[in-house]
Image: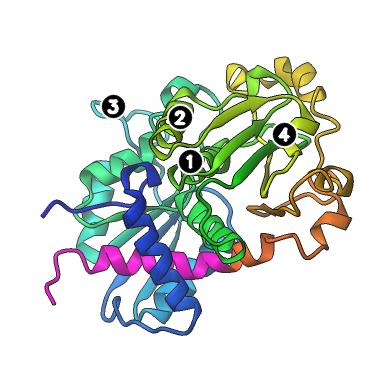
Amino acid sequence: MTMRHFLTTADWSRSELQGLLDRAQAFKDGATSQALQGKSIALLFFNPSLRTRSSFDIGAYQLGGHAIFLDAKGATWPLEFADGAIMDGTEEEHVREAARVLSSFVDIIAIRCFPDFKDWQAEREDPMITAFAKHATVPVINMETIVHPCQELAMMLALQAHLGDVAGKDFLLTWVPHPKPLNTAVANSALLMASKFGMNIRMLIPDEVYRLDERYMSAAQGFVDEAGASLTVTSDVEAAYAGADAVYAKSWGALPFFGQWEGEAPYRAKGKDFMITPEKMALTNNAVVSHCLPMRRNVKIADAVVDSPAFLGIEEAGNRLHVQKAVMEALAQQGETS
């Protein structure tokens, strides 16, 4: 049996993802597991975290295991990931060694590593976590790189709780304002997850430069085609909100300006009125609304919306614990026979 990683939901079938969601719901309802009894997970953080670190640490504990936090930006050796690299710079250790050594200590490796925002053509290959997955001899979990699969499992668990079967429902992924360009990871994953589950997707962006990487646009188009659903990209705010069943907010940087953000400013200005407001929500089909957090109030979403019963952001964040336990359990039990 080939060892599986959890790097992107694109690698998992809808039925497999639903199995993880069902197991997560069971955990949420009080089910217990000792799937990590006597086992450990290494949590490598190249970037800051609040929800991810705490939910993985607590989740491992609740599964009977031990989590070790590694500050990979400051408290471990700087890592090189490129094959054939001549390591005469700041990097002290290659992933080839680090991944194999960690694999001899722990049973799962989880990694959070954002892009460097320098060269999208290189960074779209997700080089750090890809190198770990190649050289590790234990399963690897993506805690957010250029996608955020755990976050979007949490999103889908919340959507199913409030909408039931989401197939055929209208899902609005809307770009929202932010003072600076951000990672596209959550937007990529929201697009993948909603399309895989057969939702009709509307992506609202201020300008065509905010289209997501073609890898994710094409994958989503394939998923909606398979499900008999649709994918529409628009800059028409009213049309995007009209009749929507779910609204998902995220800000992201325009990929054509990746690493050269000063040129993005006039395009970003086109979205200055894209904040989610009660007036926009009134156009929907009594939609639920969510955000991955952290979230800037009254920049991305108005207080009146965040503090309304329609907002699922806290529930979604809480779901992180349960979906990650389901993922850790599934990976830890690979190859086990009943």
Q: CA distance from mark 3 to mark 1?
A: 38 Å
Pointer 3 with pointer 2, Cβ within 8 A = no
Question: How many residues crowd mark 4 within 10 Å: few (<14), some (14–19), many (20+)?
Answer: many
- The residue labelled by disc 2 is 221
Amino acid at pointer 3: Ala
Residue 256 visible, this angle: yes
- The residue labelled by disc 3 is 85
- The residue labelled by disc 1 is 195
Which one is in front in this view, the residue at disc 3 or the one at disc 2?
2
Q: Secondary structure at mark 1?
A: helix
Q: Residue at x 40, y 73 (%)?
A: 60
Q: Earlier in the sequence, mark 3 or mark 2?
A: 3
Q: Is residue 65 left or right of residue 190?
A: left
Residue 73, placed above or below residue 63: above
Task: Give the x, y percent position of residue 126.
Answer: 40, 35
Q: Quadrant of residue 180?
A: top right
Q: Magenta span has 320?
A: yes
Label ID, residue 5: none
Q: CA distance from mark 1 to mark 2?
A: 8 Å
Foreground residue among 186 and 29: 29
In the rendered structure, which segment of residues is drawn in magenta?
A: 319-338
Question: How many residues crowd mark 1 within 10 Å: few (<14), some (14–19), many (20+)?
Answer: many
Pointer 2 with pointer 4, Cβ within 8 A = no
Quadrant the N terminus occupies: bottom left
Q: CA distance from mark 3 to mark 2?
A: 37 Å
Q: Secondary structure at mark 4?
A: helix
Q: Residue at x 83, y 55 (%)?
A: 305
Amino acid at pointer 4: Ala
Quadrant the C terminus occupies: bottom left
- The residue labelled by disc 4 is 240
Q: Secondary structure at mark 3?
A: loop
